[in-house]
Amino acid sequence: MYSATFRQQRHVFPDLKTLLAQASPARSGDELAGLAAPDQQTRILARMALADVPLTDFLHHWLIPYETDEVTRLIADTHDQQAFAPLASMSVGAFREFLLDETTDAAVLARLAPGLTPEMVAAVTKLMTNGDLVTVAAKARVITAFRTTIGLEGHLAARLQPNHPTDDLAAIMAATLDGLAFGMGDAVIGINPATDNVETTIAMVSMLDALREKLAMPVQSCVLSHVTTTLQAIEKGAPVDLVFQSIAGSEKANQGFGISLALLREAQEAAFSLKRGTVGHNVMYFETGQGAALSANGHHGVDQQTIEARAYAVARVFSPLLVNTVVGFIGPEYLYDAKEIIRAGLEDHFCGKLLGLPMGVDVCYTNHAEADQNDMDVLALVLANAGVNFLIAVPGADDIMLNYQSLAHHDVLRLRHLLKLRPAPEFEDWLARMGLLDEQGHIPARLPAAPLQRLMAQGGLA
């Protein structure tokens, strides 16, 4: 039982789950689930009570029972007590002050990461402003590698997302070359297939790998099929770089995705066996998003931001190359408007980074949400300042297969130019060899005709 007093009136929160939910900033998903604070005063009182909660409480009061949930067991069984020791005497409020202290730097955060649980980092976000979330996340560095190195300071990578509603290979190739000409793809060239089957997956993976070899590109590709489809493709000899899967923060929600921890381990081992990495061997790619557990009725009464953070514990154990939240993709039932989408994107990035993940964000929204492209510009700009590892870009900011709005290639390019951020070093060297960089190391707004024509010709489109 937790409580806070205001004007001599004591407000009681019966358990940690209720306290966390009612301390959360307002969002439509928690209201839909009946978990949100009834009013702003209750929300503030919950935050006052939460600030006094010892961090050790999160190791003794699991929000979802250990006996019935494999994600809880994973969190508990992998918790590093030695890494947690410097924080063991702190409350949630003291932890916030510690994170904001100027002496708490990237090295300190890296040492602490194995000792933090998702519930701890979710709790501290509820006491932080958007500016706090940016300030702390900007200190954290998580570096991973496969054929490119992602997460280095001063760099911003991008996933090139050339989706097509009929999985037309020529159209996908055209969108891929368009993105490459803008310097996209150093995080991954990742296709969401319209049809999830082995034949389509193999055709797409093979096409992208042939392009990589033809252009001698240091990139990794991924077809975002279900993990079982990718496993079948590997068994048939497909040139798979990364294994993708959407994940959530509870066993029941993951069952809704058709996965388990054991299945993910099997997939990771299969990818390892191919030994396709050159500068590193991080082979997994995970996507998450606030609202996924609730939509699967697998949230167990936990607020959507906290259950989202638990998904990062699943990702962390597999040492992925990439993790991103598709922050506004699920819809206004979970994040109603731009204010909620922006807040959720900053929360997710913060929590992922603190837990030691190479965190990216799909800065996106659906057309029935109360948001527009200007709002996405704001979130992208703030995330770039927060040190996000990568962003996702689609042609014209409009994904014609998934029917949602993301960032365009030129949006990421603008951030690189504005903030003096560079692509992954291996990919930047390739851009230079291809003649796609200007004398200052920037990709010009108007590409020279010769390099662009050469790129298209080598890709088979000229």
Image (spheres, helix red, strand yellow):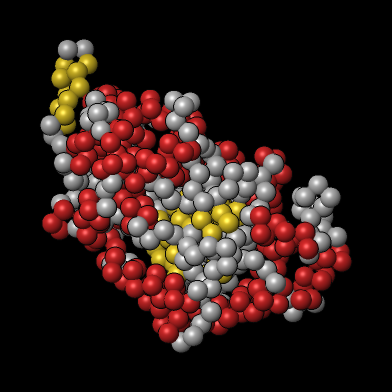
Quadrant assignment, res 49:
top left
> What residue is shown at x 61% (from left), y 79% (from top)?
207
Say whether residue 432 is visible. yes
In this rendering, the count of numbered labels is 0
Quadrant assignment, res 176:
bottom right
Report whether 367 appears left or right of 33: right
> What residue is shown at x 57% (from left), y 67% (from top)?
278
- What x and y, as percent, mark residue 44? 30, 25
> What residue is shown at x 15% (from left), y 20% (from top)?
10
Report whether 153 appears left or right of 106: right
- Vertical arrangement, residue 305 with respect to residue 323, above or below: above
- What x and y, as percent, mark residue 385? 58, 38
- Vertical arrangement, residue 200 with respect to residue 421, above or below: below
- What x and y, as percent, mark residue 336? 42, 44
- What x and y, as percent, mark residue 199? 49, 85
Q: Residue furthest top?
A: 7
Q: Nearer the viewer, residue 92 or 16?
A: 92
> What residue is shown at x 36% (from left), y 52% (from top)?
312
Q: Residue furthest front?
A: 82
Quadrant assignment, res 433:
bottom right
- Vertical arrangement, residue 210 with respect to residue 142, above or below: below
**Which of the image's four quarters has the N terminus?**
top left
